[in-house]
Amino acid sequence: MPDVSGTKRITDVGPHDYHDFLHPVIKNNYGKWKYHEILSPAHMVHVSEAGDKIYSVRVGSPRLVSGFFIRDLCDLADKYTGGYLRFTTRNNVEFLLDKEENIEPLMNDIKKLNLPLGGIGNVVANIVHTQGWIHCHTAASDASGVTKALMDDLYEYYIDAKLPAKVRIAFACCLNMCGAVHCSDIAVLGIHRRPPKLVPDKIINLCEIPSTIASCPTNAIRPDTYNGKPNVKLIEEACVFCGNCFTVCSGMPISDPLNDGVSIWVGGKVSNARTKPSFSKLAVPYLENDPPRWPKVVEAVKTILDAYKNGAEKGERVGEWIERIGWPKFFNITGFKFTKYHIDDFRLGEATMNYSAQVRQ
Amino acid sequence: MPSFAFNGKTIETDDEGYLQILDNWNKEIAEYLAKEEGITLTEKHWELIEWVRDYFFKFQVAPAIKSLIKEVGKLENLPDKKEANKFIYELFPEGPAKQLAKIAGLPKPTGCV
């Protein structure tokens, strides 16, 4: 480590300018690209107006990675790409090459490391997921565990483009959602089903009362006194189990091993190709946590994916396919039950444009 | 749970060193916590610690950084907010609100600095 004693620490400098890290070919042709072509599910080429070519080789990563894994990737990048690689938004690794002859040996070396090559085109993309039990305090389910179980089962769809269109799967371990479950083709969302349990002694010592009250989106937390000291009370009927209060006040734990679980949502997308972007809609309201392999979640996702693969026309995303055949038919094909939880009855819904007697949209 | 021994008493803290029980705080412990943070407490520090404790027991919330800077401006006669900001960062270099709350024995504030 460099000796920094005696020097003043400089903070607030912001992130480094990303232009400094761009591949020279990308830098020279910035904003001047002609077309791109998908050569296989694992690699593609971008061609610029000047005729320069840049190849990307895509490799899956588990998102929570070790230092050893990063070093392995960097060694490969040093050997074949001049040190240029990037992580995509769905946690894939992309090696950027300007020499076509390096692709083959790079892929061979990646195979030697047992990393999956794929993820481009009409595939199940790598699952974007949240922290889960590894790190997060509000988690209603594990993230990397479910993701691993799911991806083990969907591996064939990652390395091979066998689907009508691309399928984005996301996982979020609570509804505050660090993952993109609101707009993914298939989304798995951890849910709490019981309000937080108040521990008054802890709240007095560890919490700022006004911040705790303000953290509640539905005003379910109200001021109260306990042993003559300021404290809070909870109106349980108004609680939507979001866990915001536990984030600011550790005296209100919400995790509940018995009642926490996951729900499955379908049909969201971000792109505005063909149809406008759409939010995911509820398919399965609750599946219990079943570590270490979550077989019921895997089965439900597989059911949706198989129905989609068999039913959709080429180029149709999951949401577009369901809109075409209709939601009743979607529930028929998949065999999921339509329950009271599928009806949008959020009591503050009248304040939003989302309020109607329709099925949750 | 992490803790430290102080005058024959075990004082519990959270992972980041904030006291778990408000009543455990006293001036000697404040000195100890400040030492852990690498700060030697001066007159100026004590003025702020007392003010922030008064504020907390009045409102049950640590002051926002904005009102903290305002108070420093008043105490030190620094009408310029930037000067006051600089002054308080010199007293508590690792983030004034958090370090101040920690040394004053208050719960971890929900803000960023």
Image: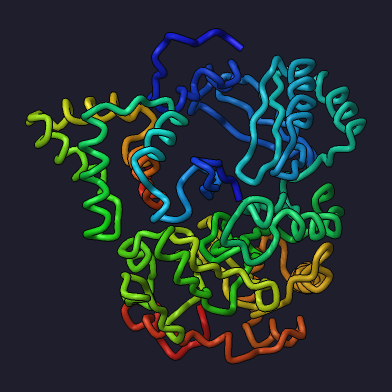
B18 versus B80 height, above or below: below
Identify the residue at image location x=79%, y=54%: A148
- Count up the numbered dots: 0
Depth check: A197 or A77 in front?
A: A197
Quarter assignment of residue A113: top right
Is residue A139 visible in the rendered image? The answer is yes
A72 versus B71 height, above or below: above
Give coordinates of residue B42: x percent, y percent: 26, 26
Horizontal side, residue A247 vs residue A181: left or right: left
Identify the residue at image location x=70%, y=85%: A331
Horizontal side, residue B107 vs residue A155: left or right: left
Horizontal side, residue B48 vs residue A119: left or right: left
Give coordinates of residue A107: x percent, y percent: 85, 29
Depth check: A63 or B63 in front?
A: B63
Identify the residue at image location x=82%, y=39%: A117
Quarter assignment of residue B4: top right
Is residue B13 visible in the rendered image? The answer is no
B108 versus A37 height, above or below: below
Identify the residue at image location x=75%, y=45%: A62
Q: Quadrant of the N terminus of chain A?
A: top right
Give coordinates of residue A134: x percent, y percent: 68, 51
Residue at the farthest front position = B8
Give coordinates of residue A97: x percent, y percent: 71, 22
Quarter assignment of residue A262: bottom right
